[in-house]
Amino acid sequence: MVLRLARWTAVGDVPRSGILVGAPHTSNWDFVMMLLIMWRGGVTPRVLIKHSLFKGPFGWLLTRLGGVSLDRDNPGAVVRDLVREARSGEPFLLILAAEGTRTKGEYWKSGFWRIAREAHLPIALAFIDGPSRTAGFGPTIEASADVVAVMDQVRDFYRDKRGIHPERRTEPRLREERRSGGGTPAV
């Protein structure tokens, strides 16, 4: 109902398990929008959020909404715990903003791909597109070892997705693509 009142359209089916990439991440409202869409499907996901946001009066609220505090300088312990939880066999859905920031950058963070591979979970693609006032879910893809092939699928899906502030959108590409021999990814 909130989405309709705001004149946004939600599309696609909410995945029940996987690593969900939320992109483009261009606004503080992205988190709220994704939660509304997930709740519409009856799902309360886990959401990786930078640890500094848990300080102060909103920490308890973020935790209640499924927030998982992540220290970007030392993510190893949190990631290991999440992978262990994901491998438990229970439905597990974790949202990550692959861009890692709401400002335009050069590369996405590769955590979604690495966690999906380690936990043996699919990568589910979610989006927010301000110009069309549409948000929702797209395909689910396998997190194969071929990072270039995975990212080609990701780029294909996000090609026409702009975010709430299109000028802040970061093109979907990972540093790992260059290291894998894929050269400079096409954008």
Image (cartoon, grey):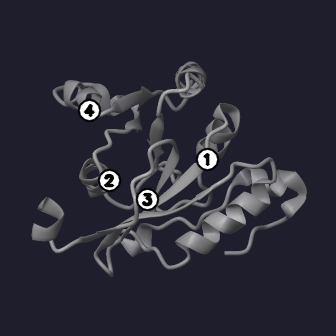
Residue, disc 3: 103
Q: CA distance from mark 4 to mark 3?
A: 22 Å
Q: Nearer the viewer, mark 2 or mark 3?
A: 2
Q: Is residue 184 left or right of residue 135?
A: right
How far from the left and from the top, in percent, is residue 78? 52, 23
Instruction: Pick the quarter of the image with the C terminus.
Output: bottom right
Q: Secondary structure at mark 3?
A: loop
- Kindly identify which residue carries mark 4: 62
Q: Is residue 171 above or below residue 177?
A: below
The location of residue 23, given as percent across then percent down, is 46, 60
Which of 138 and 167 lies nearest the eye of the viewer? 138
Instruction: Name the residue: 71% across, 58% down.
Output: 150
Q: Nearer the viewer, residue 157 or 179?
A: 157
**In 3D space, how far apart are the residues under numbered discs 2 and 3 (Cα atoms)?**
18 Å
Work out whether residue 8 can be spotted: yes
Residue type of the residue flagged with mark 1: Pro
Report which residue position mark 2 lands on: 34
Which three-letter amino acid code belongs to the residue tagged 4?
Leu
* Badge 2 amino acid: Met
* Callout 2: SS: helix
Looking at the image, is mark 2 or mark 3 earlier in the sequence? 2
Separation of residues labelled 4 and 1 (CA atoms): 25 Å
Numbered mark located on residue 122 in the image: 1
Q: Residue at x 46, y 74 (%)?
A: 161
Q: Nearer the viewer, residue 169 or 137?
A: 137
First-in-chain label (4 vs 2)? 2
Q: Secondary structure at mark 1?
A: loop
Q: Amino acid at mark 3?
A: Thr
CB atoms of marks 1 and 2 within 8 Å: no
Choose mark 4 or mark 1, whichever is in front: 1
Which tag, 4 or 3, sits closer to the chain's start? Answer: 4
